[in-house]
Amino acid sequence: MPRTLDSQITVEKTPSYFVTKEAPRRIFNMSRDTKLIVVVRNPVTRAISDYTQTLSKKPDIPTFEGLSFRNRSLGLVDTSWNAIRIGMYAVHLQSWLQYFPLSQIHFVSGEKLITDPAGEMGKVQDFLGIRRVITDKHFYFNKTKGFPCLKKTESNSSPRCLGKSKGRTHVQIDPEVIEQLRDFYRPYNIKFYETVGQDFRWE
């Protein structure tokens, strides 16, 4: 990490930190005052999105259903598959809570980040203890992508949108498979809501 003055905030982003076993200890040893921001979304939607992205790079992989279950008729979900395991937020959070208090962790709703980016960014700025400089003036919705884009400044309308790998149409999944996965994630979601004191309404 670069050296940071008292008047500065250094931000580093790596999606795999939250699910990497060694990360909480390593980050704690680097700086126990670190504030953590975690973007979460409906774990079923997240798994489908993960699969869609992988499929675009490796078209010959097995079906989503085949990867999701060890035995579908028995409803046995394969938690060794990364796309499924990542969405078990309550499990991963326990590793972080061994090192960091909940007051140092902020959870961003991935759904609200799309529908109300300024509102979610307002909460992030409050959490970081900084003035709210990013407001609704900094966003516009890109209908083609289905995501908001960030305007670089209020006067400069040249936007920054998500890359080509984001916003692609998800593969169609059997509604019964989705229902089975919702059932699987429900207890993990409830535990997660209770732990963080926030209901993300993923039902």
Image (cartoon, rainbow, N blue to C red):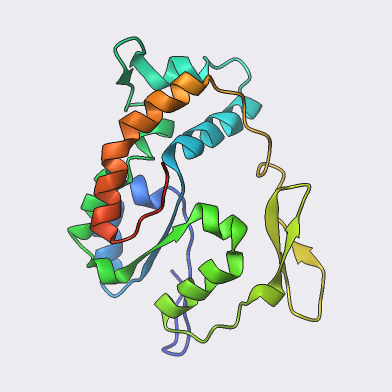
Looking at the image, which residue is at 47% across and 73% down?
Answer: 123
Location of residue 115 in the rendering, given as x and y in whole percent from the top left corner: 60, 58
Query: In the rendered view, would you say 178 is above or below 8?
Result: above
Residue 162 appears in the rendering:
no
- Residue at left 21%, top 51%? 94
Query: Residue at coordinates 26% horizontally, 39% vertically from top-left?
Result: 187
- Left or right? Give the position of 195 relative to 16: left
Q: Is residue 138 visible?
A: yes
Q: What residue is rendered at 77% in x and 51% in y?
A: 143
Q: Is residue 134 left or right of residue 7?
A: right
The correct choice, above or below, for 138 with respect to 70 in the image is below
User: Residue 130 at what x, y percent from top left?
Assistant: 47, 84
Q: How many marks?
A: 0
Q: Is residue 188 above or below residue 94?
A: above
Asked whether 27 or 138 is in front, the reply is: 138
> In the image, 132: left or right of 83?
right
